Image (tube, helix red, strand yellow):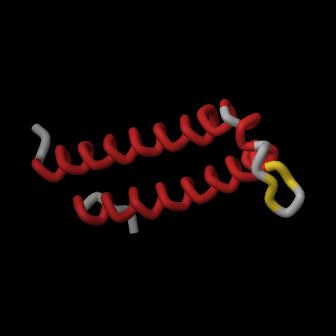
């Protein structure tokens, strides 16, 4: 039988997972669909579409990784299943 904390933990973990999948989809596909439109904006001599395809998505993925780990740890601690 599942405890209320287990249900809450799974609900919050599932919500976090779907948020991360949405962000991953956005930075993997949606941004790259608009590369040509973004290339009309130039920052420091580089077209924005080129920068987002070459560096921006990678930076976003690294930030997402650290944010996910921190958020999941706080969910685990809140529900009493954290590993110390």
Where residue 15 sits, quadrant-wise, is: top left
List the single residue furthest toward the front.
Answer: 40
Where residue 18 sits, quadrant-wise, is: top left
Rendered-image quadrant of the N terminus: top left
Q: Nearer the viewer, residue 14 or 4?
A: 14
List the single residue furthest toward the bottom.
Answer: 84
Q: Position of residue 14 (x, y in %)?
A: 32, 41
Q: Is residue 50 left or right of residue 33?
A: right
x 62%, y 32%: residue: 29
Q: Nearer the viewer, residue 57 or 15?
A: 57
x 76%, y 50%: residue: 41
Rendered-image quadrant of the C terminus: bottom left
Q: Position of residue 81 (x, y in %)?
A: 28, 58
Q: Position of residue 62 (x, y in %)?
A: 63, 56
Q: Position of residue 60 (x, y in %)?
A: 62, 53
x 56%, y 54%: residue: 65
Q: Is residue 39 left or right of residue 19?
A: right
Q: Is residue 34 left or right of residue 64?
A: right
Disc tally is 0
x 81%, y 54%: residue: 42
Asked if 33 appears above or below 54 in the picture, the reply is: above
Asked if 70 appears above or below 50 in the picture, the reply is: below
List the single residue furthest toward the right.
Answer: 45
């Amino acid at each position: 039988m599942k405890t209320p904390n287990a249900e809450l933990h799974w609900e919050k973990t599932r919500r976090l997972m779907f948020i991360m999948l949405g962000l991953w989809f956005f930075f993997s596909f949606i941004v790259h669909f608009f590369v040509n439109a973004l290339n009309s904006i130039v920052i420091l001599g580089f077209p924005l579409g080129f920068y987002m395809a070459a560096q921006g998505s990678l930076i976003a993925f690294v930030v997402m990784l650290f944010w996910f780990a921190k958020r999941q740890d706080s969910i685990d601690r809140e529900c009493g299943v954290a590993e110390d």
